[in-house]
Amino acid sequence: MSFLPRLHLFEIADQPWCPHKAIEYAQLCLTHCWNLRLPPVAKVSSAVVACEVLADNFPDLSSFTFVDLGSGAGGPSATFEKLLNARLRAQHLPPAQFLLTDLNPHPREWAALTKQQENISYISEPVDASKCGRLVPQNRKECRMFNIAFHHFDDPLAVPMLRSAIESADAFIIFELTARDLSSMLILPGLILIACQYTLLRFWRSPLHLIFTFVLPLAPLLMVFDGFVSIMRCRTSDELHDLVRRTDAPGLENWEFRSGKSPVMYPTTNVHWFMGVKKTAK
């Protein structure tokens, strides 16, 4: 339950007029947020917590291919692959597979990633999550992932995306790092510091990035503005359940739906998740 109404406002990085460099920076900075640890208040990253959610809810991880819908420049899938498959190797089990897709694919970045991690592959053509069929072979289970991506889609797009997942896949999971609540609002000032930190870590040799971070601070403002809009776009578990019901997908009675909130850093940061799993895929 949220006391704030959901508002599908516009994010700057979603707009066709937004410069490619700004979109790329926002995507890379969000990936940095997934992997950020702040000891002693946050001993593990959001990516680690999300992997715990996956491991707890998918006991047969090796049989799954996790399809990242809306991968952007790569997102957290590379970290998920390392963490989950390290766990599986320790148990002497085969690795899980990861598949990167996007309506606006990034084959150059993805190709570089797959050279480093053999259990990651990608589809170089555009993939529309609202109308795509099955994306992995029948001998593997398909779990579609929306990593801080599902809030980008208003109901007319979100419903067919869920219907497509229910009709064609074996599971889906929606991860968000914010919710429509005051604790998430407290993250916004921190995004200024995170943007400054990331520029120094990744782009300290780039005069352009330094100027637009520290002289004309458009990069931090972009992260704060789009961060606020993301918070207002996020859905509660009840709202997501309602979207599932509105799909009218055949075989809906053969699915189980779960949701939760897993803490990362009290009181501001949590991994919010909502998943559907076909009963035969358990």
Image (cartoon, rainbow, N blue to C red):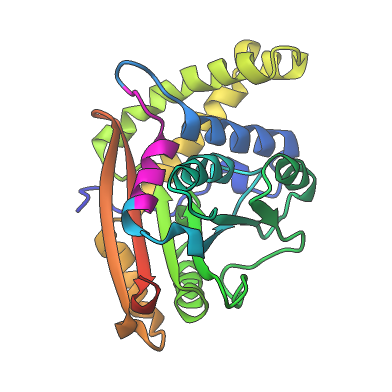
Magenta stretch: helix, strand or loop mostly: helix
Q: Residue at x 53, y 35 (%)?
A: 30
Image spot of residue 119 (x, y percent): 63, 51
Q: Residue at x 66, y 20 (%)?
A: 202
Look at the image and tell me whether residue 144 can be seen.
no
Q: Is residue 54 above or below residue 239?
A: above
Residue most toward the bottom? Answer: 250
Q: Residue at x 41, y 37 (%)?
A: 48
Q: Which residues are magenta?
A: 42-55
Residue 43 belongs to the span the image colors magenta: yes
Image spot of residue 205 (x, y percent): 75, 12
Residue most toward the right? Answer: 108
Q: Is residue 101 above or below residue 169?
A: above
Image spot of residue 4 (x, y percent): 26, 48
Instruction: Give the tally of numbered discs.
Output: 0
Q: Nearer the viewer, residue 216 or 153?
A: 153
Q: Is residue 99 left or right of residue 276?
A: right
Q: Residue at x 76, y 16 (%)?
A: 206
Q: Nearer the viewer, residue 85 or 15?
A: 85
Image spot of residue 73 (x, y percent): 67, 43
Residue 20 figure quarter: top right
